[in-house]
Amino acid sequence: MTAADVAVAGTGMHPWGKWGRGFVEYGVTAARAALADAGIEHTDVGFIAGACTIRNGYPGFVAGATFAQALGWSGAQIASCYAACASGAQAIAVARAQILAGLCDVALVIGSDSAPKGFFAPVSGDRPDDPDWLRFRLLGATNPAYFALAARRRMALYGSTSADFARVKVKNAGHGAANPNARYRAKVTEEDVLASPIVADPLRLLDICATSDGAAALVLTGVDHARRRQRRPVRLSAVATVTPRFPNHLLEIPNFATDSCLVLNPPETPFRASIAQAAYEQAGVGPEDLDLAEVYDLSTALELDWYEDIGLCPVGDAEGLLRDGATEIGGRIPVNPSGGLASFGEAVPAQAIAQVYEITRQLQGRADDRQVRPARVGIAVNQGLFGHGSAVVLRR
């Protein structure tokens, strides 16, 4: 079996929002939907990978076993994966490896969260050796403070404007309006974005994604197994989770400073770009082959960075790509046709899985009013904390 021989055979999702229920309920709903989509009973699943949440007590730390128990103990092998916003991709990678190694025929991947309202806070307790704890205690730096620093950098280097950032939100809100699983389905204007309150200058409330409840799930099988059960299996051609290379010269959550570049030049390929490059090499495709992308739009400005990181345009040209309408549905390379995190909000362990859900549905021609045409190759990219990140390439 080659790396291209794993398929997404089923997809499922619980709508995202603030529902006030437990993460297990959301995850089980998504898992049952994915199993039904694949036409597979949960007792036929040989491996369950749960993406963990750190906000829901011990069951969240052992998500694989939690979901296995909730679905009904079946003797399946399990794994629980945590990598912050890349947790879902880590769970996908582990499940894919099990199939490629011949250790199981069918794997189930589940990510779910029940998130608090407002900014994410560090895990409780005193841990002065934890950079995530320190950044809150010493700097008072919430996640949007980092998003704002990245936005300011973009404005200084490439001349981005607040109107450019607003256009990203307008685009993604327009896409999300056609997605029944999105939390926010109202279209917005540039004026709406620019009139919303400042959160971390230059970013406003509508530039930043909210926290949400939500869940997504995938059934993975060998391609031949999927073909026997459905007409349109989508190939999972690459899952890249490479680390940064020293020196890492761009400030990332939760660090206070970059690595020193006094004696070594920065690597030719920065961290986020290296994640995508590794996935392209694995899949045997390049950015010129893409028909759509799902990127990590925690803020509007960060989406523009990703255009360049995944090779959609040269560095510094993202604003031009956006202004030309190339990243809208109907444009040359639609980005976040799902509506992105701007429309869904953050349900951390489910995010990367939800991106793969969207691309799979697009490649199967099942995205209804937000369908991208043609849709043959797509990429999903994410960044977690402490050097975690992911890129997933899917092909029809």
Image: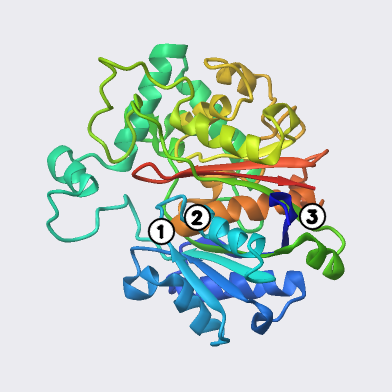
Task: Please give the residue where the numbered disc 1 appears in the rendered image.
Answer: 82
Q: Is residue 31 left or right of residue 246?
A: right
Mark 1 secondary-structure assignment: loop
Number of residue marks = 3
Q: Is residue 258 left or right of residue 268?
A: left
For disc 2, the neighbor class at 10 Å (few under 14, some 14 to 19, many from 20) is: many
Decide which of 301, 224 is in the foreground and name it.
224
Q: Amino acid at mark 2?
A: Gln
Decide which of 208, 281 is in the foreground and name it.
281
Instruction: Please report whichever mark, 2 or 3, sits nearer to the chain's N-terminal start.
Output: 2
Q: Are marks 2 and 3 in contact (CB under 8 Å)?
A: no
Task: Please give the residue where the numbered disc 2 appears in the rendered image.
Answer: 90
Q: Are marks 1 and 2 in contact (CB under 8 Å)?
A: yes
Q: Amino acid at mark 3?
A: Arg
Q: Position of residue 84 (x, y in %)?
A: 40, 52
Instruction: Please report whichever mark, 1 or 3, sits nearer to the chain's N-terminal start.
Output: 1
